[in-house]
Image (spheres, helix red, strand yellow):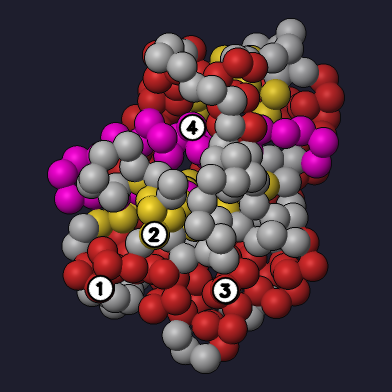
Amino acid sequence: MALIAVAGSSGAPGATTTALALMSTWPLEPGYRVILAECDPDGGDVVVGALAGRTPGGYGMRNLALAARTNQLSDAFWRQLIDLSETEAQDRLLLPGLTDPAQASSMQYAWNPLTDLLLGIEHTTPSHDVIADLGRHGGTGPSSALVRRADLVLVVVRSTLRGVYLAEPRVRALVEDLEAHGTGQDALQLLVVRSGPYSAGEVADRLGVPVLAELPDDPRAAAVLSDGDDAGRRFPRSDLMRHAASAADRVRAQVTRRRVRLAPRSANPPAHPASAASNQERISHAG
């Protein structure tokens, strides 16, 4: 259905935890999947964080740079996915990020074809939604295609003075890029983490960007997603996960509204990058 980019800002953690919460609660109809792609040039967190290293080694974004240069990106992409589903449906998938910031330079020429691929897999069977975690610095320079072509760009902001102050340059740069090269400023919205004295309305007024949804400051549940703490039986019903599910519904609705508005200017959908049958066989299982 969509490509959604989730961005943080310097000194303000929360983008990866938020992206993982959205992926975990993403509403999936039969025949749909969701992929969380860690596109942070500083490196991925999920394998050593939420999964506590309990995954097969060697998978991830770092293997896509050479594949892009040799026109083998589509085949390589499906081999890098790790299945995070709690059922046999293989419907919640992870593309692990870089393991070293030094690897970011090797991805310079891979971001455009990777963005093409992420947009194209919407039209495969089963269909895929993609949540791209940009971290604090992704979506600029060579990886700007992820922002410019995303259906929606969400900036995670904590409702503290520090959080809002540090988010200002990030939001300003994204607004300018979307206006100049993307689909317009209305692609950008905020996800506000209620961890300070400012209301969502005050944060929106200060940054000049609307708030799509609010998330609670829920350290215990967030630690499950950021550090692999024991989930426990209450985790799926925690404040964080309940609000994340509501936010995911709002994201999907907003994507639909924007697509209807932009439909007359939409380009033809990209060709299918790979067959569903071959994709199914290539996905690794977390364990």
Mark 1 and mark 3: span between their CA atoms? 19 Å
Which residue is identified by label 1?
A: 278
Which residue is identified by label 2?
A: 284
Please name whichever residue, 269 or 283, is drawn nearer the observer in this view of the structure: 283
Q: How many marks?
A: 4
Tell which circle, 3 or 2, labels the residue nearer the N-terminal end.
Answer: 3
Mark 3 crowdedness (10 Å alpha carbons): few <14, some 14-19, many ≥20: some
Read off the magenta span.
Answer: 10-37
Residue at the image position 48 percent from the left and 12 percent from the top: 239
Mark 1 residue type: Ser
Question: Viewer-nearest of labels 3 and 4?
Answer: 3
Q: Position of residue 68 (x, y in %)?
A: 53, 82
Residue at the image position 48 percent from the left and 32 percent from the top: 21
Mark 2 residue type: Ser
Tell which circle, 3 or 4, labels the residue nearer the N-terminal end.
Answer: 4
Asked whether disc 3 touches disc 2, contact meaning CB atoms under 8 Å apart, the reply is no
Mark 3 and mark 4: span between their CA atoms? 25 Å
Which residue is identified by label 4?
A: 21
Mark 1 and mark 2: span between their CA atoms? 13 Å
Horizontal side, residue 113 vs residue 103: left or right: left
Residue at the image position 83 percent from the left and 29 percent from the top: 165
Q: Is residue 12 above or below residue 47?
A: above
Tell which circle, 4 or 2, labels the residue nearer the N-terminal end.
Answer: 4
Tell which circle, 1 or 3, labels the residue nearer the N-terminal end.
Answer: 3
